[in-house]
Amino acid sequence: MSETPIVALDTVSKRFTKRLDLAGKIARRLGAGVREETVHAVDGVSFDIAEGEVVGLVGESGCGKSTLGRVVAGLHPVSDGDVRWKGAPVSSLSHADAKAYALGVQMIFQDPFASLNPRMRVADIIGEAPLYHGLWSKSEAGDRLAAVMRRVGLDPSYRRRYPHQFSGGQRQRLGIARALAVDPTFIVCDEAVAALDVSIQAQVLNLFMELRHDLALTYLFISHDLGVVEHIADRVVIMYLGRVVEIGETEALFAEPNHPYTQALLAEVPRLDLRRRTYTPVKGEIPSPLDPPPGCHFHPRCPHAGPRCRAEIPQLKQVAPGRWSACHLNDGGVGHAG
Ligand SMILES: Nc1ncnc2c1ncn2[C@@H]1O[C@H](COP(=O)(O)OP(=O)(O)OP(=O)(O)O)[C@@H](O)[C@H]1O
């Protein structure tokens, strides 16, 4: 692995303004105190991804995983902070480097059907971007297409078919082929196997691992499924309501989770070594990101919360080699604010 991370996030935030609907706009014109609301989907997130690494990004629905994935892939501009691609801030890349970044980072989504144009044939779906960007010449396009289709386990004779003529697993392979066609080095997988049957899931996960090995790919692997993440990731980043609460190497983090939220998530995974412990599964609903709790966002659901947790945001601190956690318990107590 090289010294410079392939992607570095430096206190990245992404906010969305929920625009008023017609009723809200009318109410505001009539003088009611109606305001547009801001969602802090990603709030001050910092971590690096090394070349060749697989980083799993985990958290409950709505905690900001997809938004962060899109920020990394350059599909959302940041509201604050910096994303660096191979050491350079993406906001100030030259035209040529911006193109290399746009092609170098590809995203694979949960529902390939939604992201594949139903009126386009496979050959056009896969070949559109590399032909447009001049990565394939017209004369070699047929061979390149066949090679990338074989690479993902699709028969090149299917090149004239449409997406609806494929099964769910094949469609995901088609999505992967489209991403690979522009020779990326980094892939953001957003719940890329979540919609597949368990047996097909295993096949597609194995394909991801083969591709990582053969093409030296780096992945940000977004999933709510801890079993999948444990299988595929070298390191895991745990998010809660827009913030990172724990980062660690997969094996160590699963063996000894530090943050009460990680402990609660892992308590839901049926595993012998964890069943012996006394972790309590996460209780209640995740609060609205429109109105997150003060202090540690997790405190209303945390079995250890004290006054300090309600008042003060815990910072991500190193608690062991390779392990960072954002919990006041690591400072020796939660009883006193300030
Ligand atoms: N384009 C958008 N406009 C407004 N709000 C958004 C937008 N995208 C995401 N959000 C909000 O940001 C928050 C985080 O959403 P995000 O999809 O990133 O979470 P997630 O962890 O990926 O959840 P899921 O697993 O359900 O996809 C949510 O409250 C969501 O409603």
Image: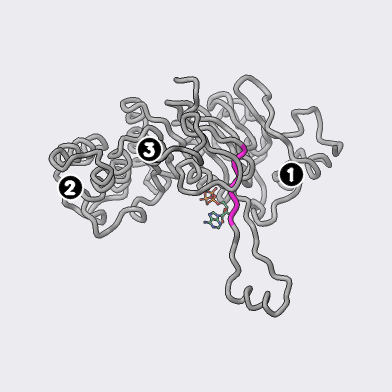
In the rendered structure, the answer to whether residue 193 lies left or right of residue 279 reads: left
Q: Secondary structure at mark 1?
A: helix
Disc ID at residue 299? 1
Q: Earlier in the sequence, mark 2 or mark 3?
A: 3
The residues bearing labels 2 and 3 have C-alpha atoms spaced at a distance of 31 Å
Instruction: Please report the bounds of the magenta region as a residue range.
Output: 11-16
- Which residue in the structure is indicated by mark 3? 96
Dot 3 or dot 1, earlier in sequence: 3
Q: Residue at x 44, y 45 (%)?
A: 191
Q: Position of residue 320 (x, y in %)?
A: 66, 21
Residue positioned 55% across, 50% down in the render = 61
Residue 118 place in picture, x, y as percent: 27, 58
Q: Quadrant of the N terminus?
A: top left
At which x and y percent is residue 4? 49, 24
Q: Secondary structure at mark 2?
A: helix
Dominant secondary structure, magenta: strand
The colour scheme is: one colour
- Local crowd size for mark 3, using a 10 Å CA cut-off: few (<14), some (14–19), many (≥20): few
Please tell me the numbered disc located at residue 1: none
Query: Gap between marks 3 and 1, in whole Å?
Result: 46 Å
Comparing 235 with 3, the one in front is 3
Quadrant where the C terminus lies? Answer: top right
Give the residue at mark 2: 159
